[in-house]
Image (tube, grey):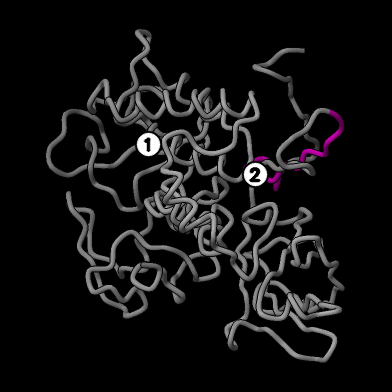
Amino acid sequence: MANWTYTTNGPFGNGQYFVRITPDGAPNSGATVTLANSGGTFNQNAVVDNGFLQLVDLGILPADDPRVANTIAVTANPNTNANAGSLAELLPNGLDFFRYNHDGYGEPAAGGNWTGAGVGRLWPILDGEYGQYQDLLGRKVAPYATDLQHYASSTGLLSEQVWDNAPPAGNTPGTATLSMDALNWSLSMYIQLIAASSNQQHGIAGLPGMATAVFNHYAGAAKPAVTTSVSPPVAGQPVTVRYAGSLAASATTITLHWGHDGWQNVTDTPMAKQADGSWTATVTVPAGTGLNTAFMNQAGTWDNNGGADYNLAAVNSPVSASTAPLTTGSTTIRYAGSLAGSATSMTLHWGHDNWQA
């Protein structure tokens, strides 16, 4: 399936990510696709969505699969916009996602009823889908359930879409558009997130509703040659690279040969063998689109992914922390959002557990 929908020559990020649709099943071919609702005609590798997360949430791909991480670095980067393939937007009351770039399914730009072509807005259910993915990465899912609570109406209903940060006059970001309200899919997603959050609080692993047999056969048995933690890497923050490729089992030493953004600042870093037979090294990703990696054992034998290298995209997140997920105690918060470039001073306004203290 990845061969049908995973491009390696796309215009976003490091060029490698899942695309929304490939009518010819060849995402690198240069073929175009015409989108519904007068969305326009584009190269198929320039239209992205987060539908690939269903491969993770259904147990087919591991959450830390590098193809997943590479795509998330494009589609879930709230510090960029749709021109760079990002579908994420930070609202005053949470994070949310557009369905796909160039989506025309929504009210006209100036507001009013659906006419058959318009501007697609944010979908609460997609924030929940992203939360499920975070759960499978071992991160807290509660913030995504809280987002959905913020998007609900005064009667507790969740709509199909909510306004983004550029709504028509008289409308408020994060509140329901004129779309379907309530949307049962959104409400069921909220229930799933609450169940997942409860499981996390009680130490129960696994995503509620996932078919165990599917996960055990596919995602649970898959061992990608290279993964990272955090996944995807965050520019400017430490990341642990884990290697379990063809050299790992017989090696007595492994060297991580790495650079960034087309092999700039090439560095060799020794790796440490782990109890499961993999090898790890922790490095810091410079600001940019990601890591380029290859691996060498004690005999000078290389694994460079058949000459293609292992290219790992990074996200320039507006807010990140030195510990991910956060744990009780000290952490360093890094801010690189819209205020950062022009600021002469910056104040972190913070609390905990829904703005206590």
List the single residue furthest toward the top: 155
List the single residue furthest toward the bottom: 300
Foreground of the two, 310 or 94: 310
Answer with the quarter of the image where residue 172 lies: top left
> From the image, which quarter does the N terminus lie in?
bottom left
- Disc 1, SS: strand
Answer with the quarter of the image where residue 279 lies: bottom right
* 172 displayed left or right of 199: left
Name the kind of residue labelled 1 in the image: Leu
Q: Residues within 10 Å of mark 2 (few under 14, many from 20)?
A: some
Answer with the quarter of the image where residue 21 lies: bottom left
Taking the spot 46% from the left edge, 33% from the top edge, the residue there is 208
Name the kind of residue labelled 2 in the image: Pro
Real-space CA distance between mark 1 and mark 2, rounded to the nearest whole angstrom: 19 Å
List the single residue furthest toward the left: 115
Please, what is the dominant secondary structure of the magenta stretch? Answer: loop
Which residue range is magenta in the image? 329-341
Q: Which mark is drawn over residue 122?
A: 1
According to the picture, the residue beneath numbered tag 2 turns out to be 318
* 54 displayed left or right of 250: left
* 149 displayed left or right of 142: left
* 49 displayed left or right of 106: right
Residue 8 in the image, given as x and y percentages of width and height: 46, 75
Residue 61 in the image, given as x and y percentages of width and height: 48, 57
Question: Is 282 covered by the magenta stretch?
Answer: no
Taking the spot 23% from the left edge, 35% from the top edge, the residue there is 107
Taking the spot 45% from the left edge, 36% from the top edge, the residue there is 127
User: Are the residues flagged by discs 1 and 2 in contact, CB closer than 8 Å?
Assistant: no
> From the image, which quarter does the C terminus lie in?
top right
- Disc 2, SS: loop
Residue 9 in the image, given as x and y percentages of width and height: 45, 76
